[in-house]
Amino acid sequence: MEAIVIPRVKKFRSLSSFIQKNGEIDEDINQWIKIRWQKWKKASRVLCDKKILLKLKGRVYRIVVRPVLLYGAECWPIKRSHIQRIRVAEIRMIRWICGYMRLDKTRNEVIRIKVGVASIEDKLREDRLCWFDHIRRINTDVPVRRCERVDRLDYKRSRGRPKKSWIKVIRHDLRTLGLVDDMV
């Protein structure tokens, strides 16, 4: 019987996500932003129609376009730079819905209120905490400290700051909202 040699690669696609050797999610986020723009183009006849109310456009955006990017995002060990890239793509779409340009100097918060779309950071945090609650309900006797083992992969320690794990992102979310693990 011949031995099958499996080549080493820096990244590969598994189902709908990219898995990178270094544990980063940059490729995944780039891919989801591209797919989101494709969904945007398909829905742009409705989203850019001036006869349709802004709140209705916002609802279509929240139902059709936003879930494309957020698919699987509850498991991402996301960084500020990732959130910033997602935020930029989203606000460009929302400004386009309203017909505003950056030169109009209308604040992003005002535009979000007009369309009725919450910030992407809040939605990401909500999804992560819902997923965390789901994991906690599977096995209630598992404390948060034991969940860290799930995130550890055998990476060779490189120079610089250690990789951000999913559980650290969850802890930061809990601190931000002033919650304890049991309150989720």
Image (cartoon, rainbow, N blue to C red):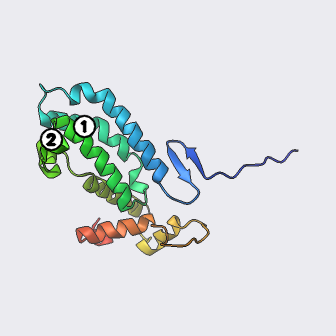
Q: Residue at x 37, y 33 (%)?
A: 38
Considering the image in quadrants, where does the N terminus appear?
top right
Observer-nearest of 151 and 134: 151
Q: Which residue is mark 2?
A: 115
Q: Are marks 1 and 2 in contact (CB under 8 Å)?
A: yes
- N-term-proximal mark, 1 vs 2: 1
Residue 59 can be seen, yes or no:
no
On the image, the x and y values in percent for residue 5 come to: 78, 48
Image height of 169 relative to 123, above or below: below
Q: Residue at x 48, y 70 (%)?
A: 148
Q: Give the x, y percent position of residue 47.
A: 22, 30
Image coords of residue 157 (percent x, y): 58, 72
| Labelled disc at residue 61 | 1
Specify whether 82 is left or right of 59: right
Horizontal side, residue 126 vs residue 9: left or right: left
User: What residue type is disc 1 on?
Assistant: Tyr
Q: CA distance from mark 1 to mark 2?
A: 9 Å
Which one is in front, 104 or 68?
104
Q: In this rendering, would 23 be left or right of 144? A: right
In front: 133, or 83?
83
